[in-house]
Amino acid sequence: MKNSFRLLTELSGNKENLQALLFLTLGSKYLNLTHNALEETVNSGNVHMVVSDGNLSWDEYFQKTKWSDFFIIEPVLFCFYHGLELTLKGLILLVDSKEVKPVHSISGLYKRLSTLKKVPEDIKKIIGKYVTENNDSMVSGFLTENKKDIDGLYESLRYPADKDFQSLNSYFKFHYQEEEALEECKEILLDIRTLQSHGTKFYRTCIQG
């Protein structure tokens, strides 16, 4: 089990695989940060209402809720989707280095990945769960309310308005989900570790083949 989770930087590859290796490694670090944050969210119960026998100070409230969705979810999701983008590019580079363009269209990257027969289906399935238009992940409600597609998610997680400051984003669908969000967080935690493990094994197969 331990070998499956070794950092990709510990693995050796030829010069042609270096670019893919760097994308996969950096992507894995963004996924690690996402995992660490959401693990704290799960462990703390994702609460926003705190019951106390006496007066609760702000510091006490913050300590009990600092990992809850209404405090951290937007930057955590940005890290998650950036990690997925880098992983997609790394996987594509690993199979066909000529097919990656300097774009941020995560749906386009996934569409390309889905055509590569060499990439294991379990990897495609995990990533597809979060980047396809009919996904039922925790971002689907936000996308529907704000009339955005998955490619518009990046800007929405980075900035609260469009480039012209004419349209403001509503983040309410992300907040105060409490127990409802916990199962989704747990699923993301499992998917991140599975993706990292299977991605590492696939990388080893490619450089050894």
Image: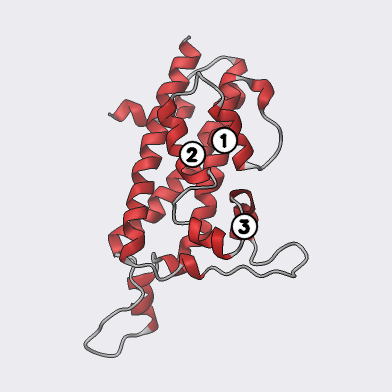
User: At label 2, which amino acid type do we have?
Assistant: Gly
User: At label 3, which amino acid type do we have?
Assistant: Lys
CA gap, disc 2 to disc 3? 18 Å
What residue is disc 2 on? 128
Residue 191 sits above or below residue 44 on the image: above
* Nearest to N terminus: mark 2 or mark 1: 1
* Nearest to N terminus: mark 1 or mark 3: 1
Residue 11 sits above or below residue 44 on the image: above
What SS does tag 1 mark?
A: helix
Please give the label number shown on residue 56.
Answer: none
Q: Residue furthest right?
A: 164
Would you identify the image quadrant in which residue 145 lies? bottom right
Most foreground residue, 114 or 164? 114
Tag 2 near tag 1, CB within 8 Å: yes
Please give the label number shown on residue 148.
Answer: 3
User: At label 1, which amino acid type do we have?
Assistant: Tyr
Dot 1 surroundings within 10 Å: few (below 14), some, or many (20 or more)? many
* Nearest to N terminus: mark 2 or mark 3: 2
Residue 100 sits above or below residue 168 on the image: above
Would you identify the image quadrant in which residue 110 lies? top right
Quadrant in the picture for the N terminus: top left
Measured as percent of width and height from the top left, residue 171 is found at 54, 68
Tag 1 near tag 3, CB within 8 Å: no
What residue is disc 1 on? 110
At 45% from the left edge and 25% from the top edge, which residue is drawn?
Answer: 10
CA gap, disc 1 to disc 3? 18 Å
Would residue 13 be seen by someone viewing this image from the given angle?
yes
